Image (cartoon, grey):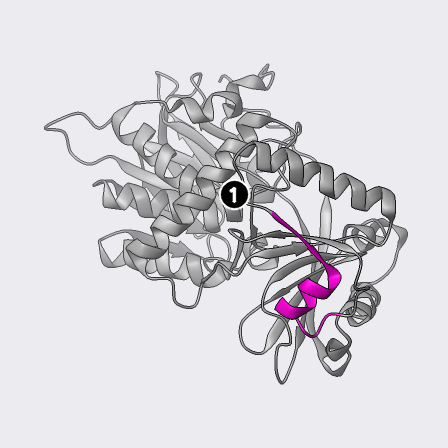
Amino acid sequence: MSFGSGRRPQRVAVIGVGVLGASVGWNLSRQGAEVVFIDARRPGEGVTNWSFSWVNASNKTVRKSYFDLNVAGMAAHRELATAIGPDSWWYPSGHLRWADDPTVGMKLLERAELLASWGYRVEVLTGTEARRLEPALAMPGEVPVVLYPDEAWVHGRHLVGRLVGQAVASGADLRSGCAVCDISTGTDGGVRTVALSDGTRLDVDIVVNAAGPGASEVAALIARQLPMRREPGVVTRIDCAQVPIGRVMHAPHIEIRPDGDASVVLHSREIDALIDTGEGVSELARMLHESARNVVPELGDCHIAEARIANRPIPADGFPSVGAVPSVPGYYEAVAHSGITLGPVIGRLLATEIVSGKRDAMLTDFRPGRFAMPADSR
C-alpha cells in the first residue's frame, strides 16, 4: 500500500511508542503521513526504558543478514544524531568485553576475528591497556579484552521523547494512557478502525504493530498468530555520586553501562536465569549490584535506585518481524528484540515501504510472512 500522488495523507495508527514505534512514526510524519501514536503508558516508559540499550552488531553474528541489518542500525543512529541532535540520548563511547574463563575468552577472540573479517572495527587489548581507558576496573593485567570502538549506548526514553516530540510538533497525535481494544476491517479485509480503551474509535488506513512484548495480543485483534518467546530480563539502576565508568562493558557475570551523570545500569543473563526460581526483584537487584562491585569496586558506594523485570519483545525464531501482512491490507509489524539498535533503520525502511510501497531487500529475511499464519484471515 502506498500513498500515491494527489491523494490525501494516509492516517497511520502506530501502536506502541517505544523506540521502534517512535522511529516509525517520526519517519512517517516526515514523509507526510498523518500519524497517531497510541500507548497504554507514556512514550518510552515500557520495555524501552528497561533495556540494556546497547547499540551493537558484535553480538549479532548468528546470521550475516541480521549482522548487516544491525550494522545499518548503527549507521542510522549516527545519521539520526545529526538530524535531531545527539544531546541527552546518544553516547558513542565504545564497548569492552572480556571473560574470566579461558574457554569463553577464546570464543570472544574468535568472534572478534570473524567480525574483523567482515569489516567491523575491533581491537584486542590487555587488561592493563583496558584499565588505561577505564581506571576504575578491577581485572588481571594479562586478560585479553575486546574493544569495539564504534558501539554505543542510548538513553531510550530520551530518544523516544525527542522523536515523538518532533512528530507531534509537525502535526502527529499522541494518545497516551490508552490501550487498543479492537481493530476493525472492511469488506476487503483491510484495516478500517482502531478502538481504544477510553471509548474512542479512530478511522485509520494503516496500523503499525510496534507493541513490543504485547505485539502478539495486538496481532490477535486481526486474527493473526504472531508467535513470541517468553524471555524475561531484570534490569537495575544504581545511583552514584559520580559515575566511575564511561563505556558499555560485558564483564564476567555482569553487564554494566553508564546511564547519564549519576546512574549506572546493570544486567546479567545469569541473573535472568533466576527469575523463575522465585527470587524477588529486590534480591535479584542486590545480586546484580554485588556482581558489579566485583568488577568496578567504586560501585559498592552506590545504592540501588530501581529495578524491574520486563519481557523482551522477541518473535519465536529470535529475529525481527518487520513489514506488511498481505492477508490484512494496511497492517504492518515492527517487532524486534534489538529495538534499540534497530529502531532508526527499521523506522526509516518501514516508513518508506508504507509510503511508497517499495520493499527494501535488507528486510527480506525478516518479513512477517515467514511465520505460519493459519489464522490470518477474518
Between residues 14 and 194, which one lies in front from this camera angle?
14
Q: Is residue 318 left or right of residue 353?
A: right
Between residues 59 and 89, which one lies in front from this camera angle?
59
- Residue 376, given in percent of the width and then of the height, sits at 52, 18
Q: What's under tag 1, amino acid-wise?
A: Ala
- Residue 233, given in percent of the width and then of the height, sits at 72, 52
- Residue 309, given in percent of the width and then of the height, sits at 71, 56
Position above or below: 323 against 231:
above
Magenta-drawn stretch contains 41: no
- Which secondary structure, mark 1? loop
Looking at the image, the residue that sits furthest to the right is 277
Residue at 55%, 33% in the rendered image: 67
Locate the N terminus and report the quarter of the image it occupies.
top left
Residue at 82%, 65% in the rendered image: 291
State whether residue 248 appears in this view: yes
State which quadrant residue 136 falls in.
bottom right
Q: Is residue 297 left or right of residue 125?
A: right
Count of picture labels: 1
State whether residue 221 appears in this view: no
Magenta-drawn stretch contains 130: yes
Residue at 31%, 22% in the rendered image: 358
Query: Which contiguous range is marked in magenta?
Result: 123-137
Binning the other alpha carbons within 10 Å of mark 1 as few (below 14), some (14 to 19) or many (20 upward) gives many
Check disc 1 and report the residue beneath it.
Answer: 211
Between residues 14 and 204, which one lies in front from this camera angle?
14
Between residues 273 and 136, which one lies in front from this camera angle?
136
Position above or below: 110 against 160:
above
Residue at 78%, 79% in the rendered image: 300
Q: Is residue 209 left or right of residue 163?
A: right
State which quadrant residue 301 falls in.
bottom right
